[in-house]
Image (cartoon, rainbow, N blue to C red):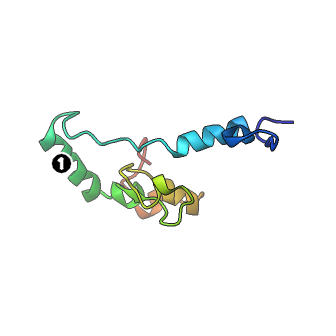
């Protein structure tokens, strides 16, 4: 038996859940990271970096912000914006995409 393959209905509250389910609940309820407005480089540098990120096409794959579901069973995380600059949405939909074919400037570390 592995730690996440059972629950204990004889317990009460969160103790019903396995350790892995408790950890998953903890992670879901963490606040998203707050973007800095001053570090690194200051306001002008951050604004310039955001503009460049979009201009060269990074924002096409690494979405600057994503919203949580309006239908989440957890009210605290329902319809919340998270500024992740993430490619989570792509990974959820397409696992074998070749980024370099549609965006030839993506190579090396970025690609």
Based on the displayed image, in which of its 4 quarters is residue 93 positioned? bottom right
Q: Residue at x 67, y 40 (%)?
A: 14
Give the image location of residue 96, x and y in percent. 59, 58
**Relative to residue 87, is residue 12 depicted above or below?**
above
Q: Residue at x 81, y 44 (%)?
A: 9
Residue 54 appears in the figure: yes
Q: Residue at x 80, y 40 (%)?
A: 8
Give the image location of residue 111, x and y in percent. 44, 48
Q: Judge from the rendering whether residue 29 lies leftward or rightward of residue 17; answer left or right.
A: left
Based on the displayed image, in which of its 4 quarters is residue 61 positioned? bottom left
- Residue count near mark 1 (Cα–Cα under 10 Å), binned few <14, some 14–19, many ≥20: few
Residue lying at the far right in this picture: please name it.
1
Q: Residue at x 12, y 43 (%)?
A: 44
Give the image location of residue 18, x and y in percent. 73, 38
Q: Can you identify the residue that label 1 sits on?
A: 47
SS class, disc 1: helix
Residue 98 appears in the figure: no
> Between 34 and 53, which is closer to the camera in this rendering?
34
Q: Judge from the rendering whether residue 87 lies leftward or rightward of residue 8; answer left or right.
A: left
> Between 17 and 51, which is closer to the camera in this rendering?
17
Based on the displayed image, in which of its 4 quarters is residue 103 positioned? bottom left
**Relative to residue 97, is residue 29 depicted above or below?**
above
The count of marks equals 1
Split into 4 quadrants, where in the image is the N terminus? Answer: top right
Residue lying at the far left in this picture: please name it.
44
Give the image location of residue 83, x and y in percent. 35, 50
């Amino acid at each position: 038996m592995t730690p996440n393959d059972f629950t204990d209905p004889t317990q009460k509250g969160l103790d019903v859940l396995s350790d892995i389910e408790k950890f998953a609940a903890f992670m879901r309820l963490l606040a998203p990271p707050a973007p800095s407005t001053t570090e690194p480089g200051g306001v002008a540098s951050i604004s310039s970096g955001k503009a460049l990120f979009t201009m060269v096409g990074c924002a096409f794959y690494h979405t600057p912000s994503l919203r949580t579901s309006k239908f989440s069973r957890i009210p605290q995380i329902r319809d919340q914006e998270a500024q992740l600059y993430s490619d989570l949405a792509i990974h959820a939909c397409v696992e074998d995409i070749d980024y370099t074919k549609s965006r030839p400037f993506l190579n090396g570390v970025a690609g």
